[in-house]
Amino acid sequence: MSWGTELWDQFDNLEKHTQWGIDILEKYIKFVKERTEIELSYAKQLRNLAKKYQPKKNSKEEEEYRYTACKAFLSTLNEMNDYAGQHEVISENMTSHITVELARYVQELKQERKSYFHDGRKAQQHIEICWKQLESSKRRFERDCKEADRAQQYFEKMDADINVTKADVEKARQQAQVRHQMAEDSRADYSSILQKFNHEQHEYYHTHIPNIFQKIQEMEERRIVRIGESMKTYAEVDRQVIPIIGKCLDEIVKAAESIDQKNDSQLVIEAYKSGFEPPGDIEFEDYTQPMKRTVSDNSLSNSREGKAELKFGGKSKGKLWPFIKKNKGATPEDFSNLPPEQRRKKLQQKVDELNKEIQKEMDQRDAITKMKDVYLKNPQMGDPASLDHKLTEVSQNIEKLRLEAQKFEAWLAEVEGRLPARSDQARRQSGMYDAQNPATVNNCAQDRESPDGSYTEEQSQESEVKVLATDFDDEFDDEEPLPAIGTCKALYTFEGQNEGTISVVEGETLYVIEEDKGDGWTRIRRNEEEEGYVPTSYVEVYLDKNAKGAKTYI
């Protein structure tokens, strides 16, 4: 089966077919190229997706990744990055092993094909020239033969005519002989050219064309084999990354299996545990004997100050601190907005971080000191004085960090010292509140919780009564606000983050409606609708000594 023998007369069709073969190869190259672009785009989208859901540094999200479920999700995101990397590998390998190689091969194939068809056209042109020569000699031989016949007939006519001179007859005879000689020469030339043409034609159809077509056939078959090999490579490139992709998926499964719901539940306890105990029982007050009823220290109807503390809902000014809802805003530096247990953890964490930074700076100082000693012993290595500025800067940083650490350690010691033993404290619960009569209002106020969620004194069980706020909402809706007992000036700006606190701006003047009871908080009012607690250290208080309820504390 050879194109040279079977398709000896299909030169034009073979030319079209081989061009079609090159077009198919270029189409496959384009297909693979677009596949590599898709793989790159997919990998990029996967990476962007993984990056989008990565926790932001120094944010609340980063703290959430302590939980095993979040850790598993983070592992999934990391594995997706590796997964995306394998698609990039697919793109790179397909580009280098298929696209680039085939593009180079196509150029070589085009040159080879051009060369073969150039030789074929050259052979065609040669046989056509030979054919034209044959036709020319044939026509000349035919013409000479006709001319010789006419010359012979003319001679015979002249020879038979008695009126023609002998000289004319001799001239006609010589002319006939010349024509006959020319015919013979044309015949010999035609015969020679014919033999030559037959030889060239035989060579053309049985040697030149078969050889050229055979080379074209081999070229075409190599092209077919090459595209088949490229398709195998296409599959192998995918197959090579399957084990690694499988490992990525296995790691995702492993991360999912590492999720520990009990551990996450424990982390929730550690994250939100306030350190308070549940409230104790509420004492029963007997109101069934109106005549014997006396003004109770715990009465809910005798103290306006107590009533103001009791209100809940939209008009509430005295919700219990351990159960208040946090508002968004800047966190105080000393974490005073947190319950005591959480505040202690935050302060401890801050102290640990500062100690690490101090150690890091000290290591850097030691390294600079050693380098300075080396320079002193070997001046050619450097100028020791050039390190003095850096050494001073590091020492200053260490001193600043130590002062910062001491500040947080002091706060930590304060919190740890103020945390009472659980068994000695009775804690109040959301929905419960205190009420005091005028005789005991100041003493009981010392027992209320501070806005940071801690207690400063033990509660007086005899002077405290607890009732559900919802039972008394309507009763206290019409109560008048507490009277002002003085004024205060804000020394610093305070952002009230908890319900019950109020934000103030440095230099602002406000009314004092309840002074510090020993818990570090003063109750102030801006207007009839805005009142709350601020840290006593943030304001300068000017009490009106004639005001009702104003007392002096030493």
Image: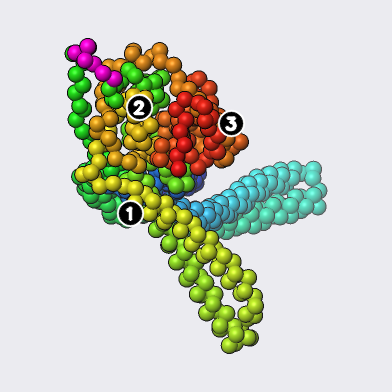
Please give the name of the residue rendered at 47% of the width and 36% of the height, measured from the top-left corner: 552
* Highlighted range, magenta: 289-295
Please give the name of the residue rendered at 21% of the width and 21% of the height, measured from the top-left corner: 285
Please, which colouring scheme is shown?
A: rainbow
Quadrant of the image occupied by residue 241: bottom left
Give the CA distance from mark 2 to mark 1: 82 Å
Residue 141 is left or right of residue 5, and the answer is right
Confirm whether residue 12 shows in the render: yes
Residue type highlighted by circle 2? Ala
Give the CA distance from mark 2 to mark 3: 30 Å
Please give the name of the residue rendered at 34% of the width and 51% of the height, measured from the top-left corner: 417
Q: Is residue 293 magenta?
A: yes
Residue type highlighted by circle 3? Thr
Q: Position of residue 43 (x, y in %)?
A: 42, 46
Which one is in front, 359 or 367?
359
* Residue linked to disc 2: 439
* Residue furthest bottom in the image: 377
Residue 166 is left or right of residue 149, and the answer is right
* Residue linked to disc 1: 241
Disc 3 packing (10 Å; few <14; some 14–19; many ≥20)? some
| Residue mark closest to the camera, 2 vs 1 | 2
Task: Please tell me whether mark 1 sits on a helix, a strand or a loop.
Answer: helix
Q: Position of residue 105 (x, y in %)?
A: 48, 56
Disc 2 packing (10 Å; few <14; some 14–19; many ≥20)? few
Please give the name of the residue rendered at 47% of the width and 28% of the height, measured from the top-left corner: 513
Q: Position of residue 90 (x, y in %)?
A: 39, 52
| Residue mark closest to the camera, 2 vs 3 | 2
Quadrant for the C terminus in the image: top left
Decide: marks 2, 1 in contact (CB < 8 A)?
no
